[in-house]
Structures are given as C-alpha cells and as structure tokens.
Image (spheres, grey):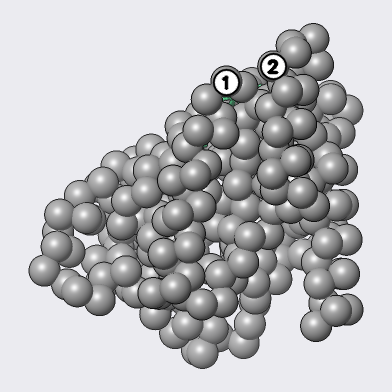
Amino acid sequence: MKIISIINQKGGVGKTTTVINLAAGLSQLNKKILVIDLDPQGNATTGLGLSNTDDSETTIYGVLNGSKKISETIKKTNFENLDLISSNVDLSGLEVETAGDEKRAFILKDKLLKYIDENSTKYDYVLIDCPPSLSLLTVMALVSSQSLLVPLQTEFFALEGLTQLMKTIERVRVNLNTKLNIQGILLTMYDKRNKLSSEVEKEAREFFKEKVYKTVIPRNVRLSEAPSHGVPVLVYDKNCPGSKSYFSFTDEFINQEFNMESVA
Ligand code: ATP
Ligand code: MG
C-alpha cells in the first residue's frame, strides 16, 4: 500500500482535480484506491459524489480526533475500486483542538499503520488531498506518505511558493519522515496560446529536471464542470482534452511505478 500526498500550499492549482482523476484513472486499471480528503473544504469528497456535510465523526476528522478507526470511516463511491474517507468543515478546528499534543503530527500515520496491521492490505494506493497551506494537516500528510506529488499551475507566481514548499519537505524529511520522496511535479492548466505557460514549463523543467512529468494538463473547461456533477472528468467526458491528459498522466505514473519497482 503506497501512500502519496498531493500537495501545494498555493490554492487552486489543481490538487483536488489531480487526486480525483489519478484515482479514477488508476481504479479503471484495476488498482484499488483509497482517497483521503484532508482538506476542510471537502472538494475531493463532493467531486467524487459524496456529501461534505456528513456527521463529522464518520469523516477523517473522527479519525484524527481519536474517536474512530480508519476502517470505520471508509465510504464507497459510485466508482469501482475507489473508496473515500470524506472530510467536512469541522476538520479546520483540529489544529487548535490538538494544540497540547506534541505527537500530533503522527496521528494520521499511526492510524494508517494500525489499519495496515489489522486489515489484510486492501489498497494499492492511498492518495491524500491536502489543503492549500503548510499547516498541521499538510505536515500530517507528509509524515504519513512515502512520496508526494506537486501540481504546478503554469502561471505567473507558480514557482514562487515552491521554494517554501521544498524547505518544508526537507524539514519533514530530516525531522519526521526520512523515507519521504518527491514522486513528481505535474504541470496543470497549461494554455498553449499563452507564452507564460511555456515559460513556466521551461523554468520548471530546467530546475526540477526529470521530476517534471512529460504529460502536461491543459486548461480545459470540462475539467471544471465535472466536479459539480460529482464525477471524475474521466467519467463525465472521457474524450475531452482534459480526460486524455489525465489518462496519459495515469499511464506515465504507472510506468514510473513499474520502473521504480524494477530498480528496487
Ligand atoms: P484548493 O487549493 O482550493 O484545494 P486545488 O489546488 O485543489 O484548490 P482544484 O480544486 O483542483 O485546485 O482546481 C481549482 C479550480 O480550477 C476548480 O474549479 C477546478 O475545477 C478548476 N480546474 C482544475 N484544473 C483545471 C484545468 N486543467 N482546466 C480548467 N479548470 C481546471
Ligand atoms: Mg483542493
């Protein structure tokens, strides 16, 4: 069971869209996927067709406040091989509520380890949708993960936040989780008519080299329509440019995984 955080403290860069559609793409390839919505906004929850106003005890909040096990909060989605731990707005209170707990960064990790221990491993991948901040929730996700994936919007300012993000990742790696790897950087909302997009792409590839996926996600209105129907774009309109790009990203991701395994 590989745990991957989808992270960028900048808002609206395509984290949730990437979680939903990578999850959908992998599940269609018969991989068993658990999405954990770790954002109080609950966008991954509604985007997968579930409610983000459920009783908070049956959400990730119930897990992190200690009252529920992971297995008690997993919900089925309408999509085969794709389960979800939903989120709701109460999650935003967690940081204050756990202020006295010096081990709080490890709560999610401990719960996941317990799940793996008590259940014959059920998922191939756990994808964690992070909130747009470098808060406790994001640190919890990084502590729990083997790797992280950064969606990067190909617009002005996109690269500015990355230095801070890389510093946080390094700090977590040194102090809390030595196994943390960067899975890759995915360029999103690419507009080929806009020179800025290609400039950001060039800069990102020069700096992060082969860590940047070859697949680039274009700006595509179908991607923004799909969440209001509670379905991944891969289901909503599987032939649109957005879907094609997420299918090809899924393939690239799987090949990367295959190559990593054969090296290991
Ligand atoms: P937040 O930081 O608020 O959690 P996020 O990083 O998860 O945001 P998304 O919610 O995935 O970002 O995307 C932000 C908005 O842009 C959403 O309305 C989404 O539907 C839309 N969107 C995402 N990717 C694309 C794309 N490639 N083309 C067009 N619209 C997109
Ligand atoms: Mg989001």
Image location of residue 170, percent across then percent down:
48, 63
The residue lying toward the viewer, choosing from 159 and 99, is 159
Which comes before the other along the chain, label 1 or label 2?
Answer: 1
Please tell me the numbered disc located at residue 122: none
Question: Amino acid under label 2?
Answer: Leu
Q: Residue furthest left?
A: 100
What number of labels is visible?
A: 2
The residue lying toward the viewer, choosing from 219 and 166, is 166
Question: Amino acid under label 1?
Answer: Phe
Q: Residue at x 62, y 30 (%)?
A: 153
Query: Does ligand 1 reach within 8 Å of label 1's beta carbon?
Result: no
As helix, strand or loop, the secondary structure at mark 1 comes to: loop
Q: Residue at x 44, y 84 (%)?
A: 114
Image location of residue 45, percent across then percent down:
49, 44
Q: Residue furthest top?
A: 193
Q: Residue at x 52, y 48 (%)?
A: 7
**Residue 235 is at least partly visible in this image:** no
Determine the image quadrant of residue 238.
Answer: top right
**Residue 178 is at least partly visible in this image:** yes
Q: Can you identify the residue that label 2 sits on?
A: 196
Which of the image's four quarters has the N terminus? bottom right
Query: Does ligand 1 reach within 8 Å of label 2's beta carbon?
Result: no
Image location of residue 14, percent across then percent down:
59, 34
Circles 1, 2 touching at the beta carbon (< 8 Å) = yes
C-alpha span from label 1 to label 2: 7 Å
- The answer to whether 29 is drawn above or below residue 120 in the figure is above
- The answer to whether 15 is drawn above or below residue 202 in the figure is below
As helix, strand or loop, the secondary structure at mark 2 comes to: helix
Q: Can you identify the residue that label 1 sits on?
A: 156
Structural crowding at the residue carrying mark 2, measured as other residues with C-alpha within 10 Å and reported as few (<14), some (14–19) or many (≥20): some
